Amino acid sequence: MTVRVMHANEETGRWQQQTLIEAIRLRETMWGPIEDLAESRRARAAGGPFAQRIWLRAAALARRDGLQQAWMQWWQGARWLLVLMAIFALLAGAGAAAGALGDGTRPVNVLLALGALLGLHVLTLFFWLFSLAWAGKGVGGGSWAGDAWLWLSRRMVKGEGSLVPQAFVAVLARRRSQPWLLGMISHGLWILALLAALCTLLALLASRRYQFNWETTLLSPDAFVWLTERIGALPSYLGFSMPDAQTIRISDGLHVLDAQAQAQWSGWLLGALVVYGLVPRVLALAWSIWRWARHSAGLQLDDSLPGLAELRPRLMPASEPTGVDRLAAPDTVAHIQEGPESVLLVDAVCVVGLELAPERAWPPSFMQADMQDLGRVDSRAERLAVLGRLQQAAPSQLLMVCDAGQTPDRGMVATLVEWAQMARRADVILLDAAAAQADPERRRSWHERLSAAGFAPDQVHDCWPPALTESTP
């Protein structure tokens, strides 16, 4: 089943969206499932179709794990690489034209000059057309310049960020869009090279005197006349000059031609470059742009792919908990601390206690009147309940109170990280000074684990933050 993803209107945004989804899918396929409890909850809370929830989850994971930044860095580097290749194409085109004409001290063989200007262009153009006819049968993009750009841009990204170009290529292959993207790049570069060659030819022909002739051992003069007339037929319809049969016949290097004959040969060479060089590339570029636009407009997400279909139970559950309709018997459920269940205020400062010792009183005496109490949390159900309230209205600051006398296990640190992502600022307060003096290694372990989880040093406090204590009435 395929569904349309409606998120970004821009063409690049749509491909970025598909690429990040594919990067997350590849990462989970290669290295196993990602911890995504908070991201999946946000995607479910946002609602929408399954494809939209997949994108919301992937976007949150990409921001969290740096893949979105990797995309931006790779895309920027790829564009700069394209600029360098464009400069090289301009220089190569100008150099080819200058090499084809020479310095004017020796006669110019018209066939060799035409081959130097159009030989590689014709070869690569036919190869690209051939690759389109064999698309899907193992043939690559068929655009040497485009393939070189893609290969070089992929080598610019190292580490886990290399998943981004890998995912982009996978999306292109699945959509069979690679020939059109690489075709746009290749044809664009060829157009720049041919334009540079054309401008160089015009400049050299206008500033120097060249002698044109033909030289052949195998062909007869009549055969050369026929070949020259066939090549110049199409350009002549566009107004380019072409030497007549007699002029062609005597351009064998044994006769001296007048200035008018040399001008006709110049027009013939320019016309061949325009008609057989520029025009086919412009048409091929226009065709590639049209097909690429159609592929971009019809970009779809296949939610049946391995790694995506398995997300349906999590992102589109058949049923979701709506609350407790009645209390269970005391002997079948853990005790839940009763606390305020009021809706969180916008930009509130919230306080929550995580697995505090039973003898510790709650709420703490140093709480201010304008703070909102989220209660003390001990069970998994209570953790999820607090997470749901934080998601509904992200507080401006979240103060998470922990018992420094306990050992900071991975589950507790993961809960702190998940809650902290819901607030603009989050602080961890480690209480119980007596336990800290008795076992300083445990408090050090708290600081090390929280630092490894991403908490800054100014977010971890060994007592109630002084700034808040001083302002407490």
Image (cartoon, rainbow, N blue to C red):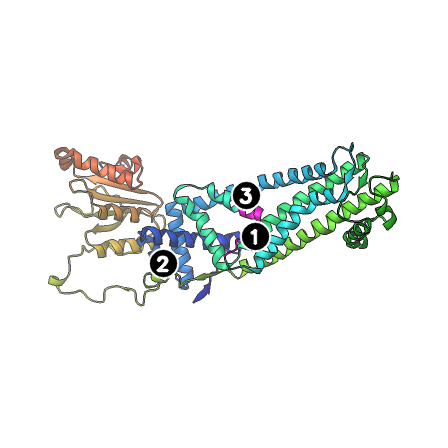
**Residue at left 77%, top 36%?**
204
Residue wearing tag 3: 79
- Which circle's residue, 1 or 2, is located before the other in the chain? 1
Q: Quadrant location of the N terminus? A: bottom left
Most extreme residue toward the left is: 331
Residue 142 numbered tag: 1
Where residue 64 sits: x, y (%)? Answer: 37, 47
Nearest to the eye among marks 1 and 3: give it.
1
Mark 2 is on which residue type?
A: Gly
**Residue at left 30%, top 64%?**
320
- Which circle's residue, 3 or 2, is located before the other in the chain? 3
Secondary structure beneath dot 2 equals: loop
Look at the image and give the residue range highlighted in magenta. Answer: 138-149
Mark 1 is on which residue type?
A: Gly
Residue 352 among magenta residues: no
**Residue at left 36%, top 45%?**
424
Left-right relation of 137 to 361:
right
Nearest to the eye among marks 1 and 2: give it.
1
Secondary structure beneath dot 3 equals: helix
Left-right relation of 172 to 24:
right
Q: Label 1, label 2: how many angstroms apart (C-alpha)?
A: 31 Å
**Crowding at label 1, few (<14), some or many (≥20) Cα neighbours within 10 Å?**
many
Residue 7: in sight, yes or no? no
Where residue 35 sits: x, y (%)? Answer: 30, 51
Question: Are the residues flagged by discs 1 and 3 in contact, CB closer than 8 Å?
Answer: no
Is the residue 139 above or below the residue 193 in the image? below
Residue wearing tag 2: 307
